[in-house]
Amino acid sequence: MSEEWTRHAKVAARFDDAGALEVRCTGLTTQAKYYKTLLREFFRKHFQRLRPGYGDYSVHICMEYTGDAPWMDLDNLAKALLDSLTGNAFEDDHQVARLLVERRVGEREGIWMRVEKIDLGQ
């Protein structure tokens, strides 16, 4: 059974049944670096059971918006979010072996992210 969401301000996180980290952040801004600081503080103060791991990871990032698509480069968003995970979910973002970043129309504006350890059979 999935854990309950840990929430603070605009951020919520939990581990799902498979052990993957799920993170949600409500609201959107075109300043991608905003998310790096917001999530790092959340992990440091409110989700302290997160410990960096080793090995390969898969990260799925989704920006959901209403109305017109925001003027935000997805690559900048991905970099800010990966930076926020460095030292928290994994030691370094070079451990990300699979990365999917997308934007789509949603019912609410925000960012959704799923981080899971993967085995590439090496």
Image (tube, rainbow, N blue to C red):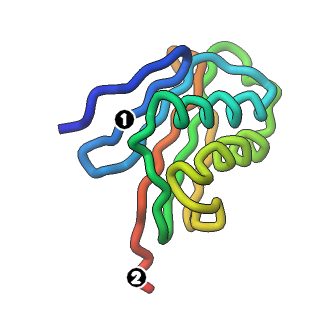
Secondary element at image label 2 = loop
Residue lying at the far left in this picture: please name it: 1
At a point 55% along the width and 62% down the height, the residue shown is: 98
Q: Amino acid at mark 2?
A: Gly
1 sits to left or right of 110: left
Q: Is residue 50 above or below residue 5?
A: below
Give residue 32's quadrant in the image.
Answer: top right
Q: Amino acid at mark 1?
A: Arg
Secondary element at image label 1 = strand
Q: Residue tagged by mark 1?
A: 14
Q: Where is residue 23 drawn, in percent x and y?
A: 48, 34
The nearer-to-camera label among 1 and 2 is 1
At a point 47% along the width and 50% down the height, the residue shown is: 115
Q: In the rendered image, which quarter contains the C terminus? A: bottom left
Number of numbered discs overlaid on the protein picture: 2
At a point 52% along the width and 36% down the height, the residue shown is: 43
At a point 44% along the width and 34% down the height, the residue shown is: 47
Q: Residue tagged by mark 2?
A: 121
Q: Where is residue 17 drawn, in percent x and y?
A: 24, 45
In the depicted view, which residue is nearer to us: 4 or 50? 50
How far apart marks 1 and 2 lie (CA) works out to 27 Å
Q: Where is residue 35 drawn, in percent x and y?
A: 68, 31
For label 2, count other residues whose C-alpha is less than 10 Å away and answer few (under 14), some (14-19) or many (20+).
few
